[in-house]
Amino acid sequence: VMLNYLLNLAQEKNLPLRAEFVANNRNRMMYITYKFAGFKEIDKQDNLVILENNFQQIQPFPDYLKIDITD
């Protein structure tokens, strides 16, 4: 839900959304989360991976959640 909120916000503001990911066994679940959210690897330096989302696969918020976003 948080990633989808950030994706929507970045898309509305016409900004790229990138993630810096340090690859290790403990972070593997977050890497999978990024991949399921549509992030693609755009750069890799040693164990640092840069991912970016092209906004093609933003999921809607689930109906069973009440989302209250305040600025």
Image (cartoon, grey):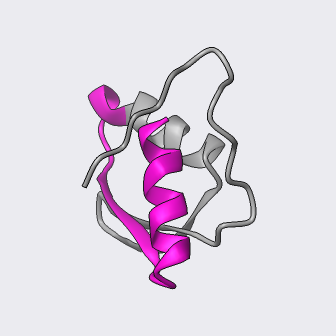
Q: Residue furthest right?
A: 56
Q: Residue furthest top?
A: 64
Task: Work out whether residue 29 or residue 48 is closer to the camera in this orientation and state it.
Answer: 29
Q: Residue at x 47, y 49 (%)?
A: 5
In the rendered image, residue 28, in percent from the top left (x then y), is placed at 41, 33
In the rendered image, residue 30, in percent from the top left (x then y), is placed at 41, 36
Q: Is residue 42 visible?
A: no
Task: Work out whether residue 14 or residue 54 is closer to the camera in this orientation and state it.
Answer: 14
Task: Work out whether residue 59 or residue 17 is closer to the camera in this orientation and state it.
Answer: 59
Which of the 4 quarters of the picture holds residue 50? Answer: bottom left
Q: Residue at x 29, y 57 (%)?
A: 47
Which of the 4 quarters of the picture holds residue 60? Answer: top right
Task: Work out whether residue 70 or residue 42 is closer to the camera in this orientation and state it.
Answer: 70
Q: Residue at x 49, y 35 (%)?
A: 1
In the rendered image, residue 57, in percent from the top left (x then y), is placed at 73, 55
Judge whether residue 41 is colored magenta. no
Q: Is residue 66 visible?
A: yes
Count of labels in the image: 0
Q: Locate residue 65 relative to residue 54 in the image: left or right.
A: left
Q: Residue at x 53, y 75 (%)?
A: 12
The relative height of residue 18 versus residue 38 in the rendered view (above or below) is below
Which portion, as a residue range, is magenta?
1-27
Which of the 4 quarters of the picture holds residue 68? Answer: top left
